[in-house]
Amino acid sequence: MNLESATCPKCGAPIIFEEGRDDVFCSHCGTQVFKDDGNKTITYRTIDEARIKEAEVKERMQKEENRQSNINFLLFLLGMIPLFLVGLYFMLR
């Protein structure tokens, strides 16, 4: 297997192109790097799956926290109804 090495244009980490491949993802920063016919590398786009996954998990956790807050508020209101009715009873008596 023939391997070509280069450096990531974004972070400078070493990257290795496998034979027959014209692109590779930097294992350090997630930048997708393409090589051209002149054997120089160019950055096409950054894909950082770990950060994407982290954002998805944070969003899911935030939704769960919001849902739990809504449930707690609803339970509070339901608990206040009997107190309100007792107070109303004594006021109207």
Image (spheres, rainbow, N blue to C red):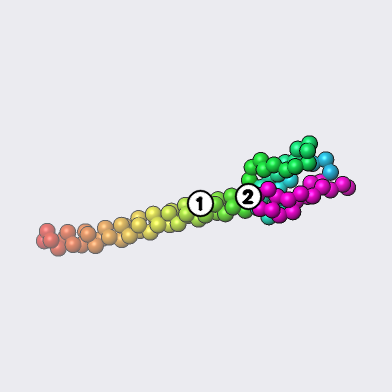
Q: Is residue 52 visible?
A: yes
- Helix, strand or loop for disc 1: helix
Q: Nearer the viewer, residue 61 or 49?
A: 49
Residue labelled with disc 1: 59
69 shown above or below 47: below
Label ID, residue 38: none
Residues in magenta, as a range: 1-18
Residue found 84% across the figure and 48% down from its top = 3
Residue at the right extreme of this rendering: 1
Label 1 CA crowd tier, 10 Å (few <14, some 14–19, many 20+): few
Neighbour tally class for label 2: few under 14, some 14-19, many 20 plus, Cα within 10 Å: some
Kind of residue indicated by mark 2: Asp
Q: Is residue 59 left or right of residue 6?
A: left
Q: Which mark is residue 48?
A: 2
18 vs 90, left or right, is: right
Q: Amino acid at mark 1?
A: Glu
User: Depth check: 38 or 74 in front?
Assistant: 38
* Occupied quadrant, residue 89: bottom left
Asked whether residue 22 is in view, the answer is no
Give yes or no for residue 75 being in the magenta stretch.
no
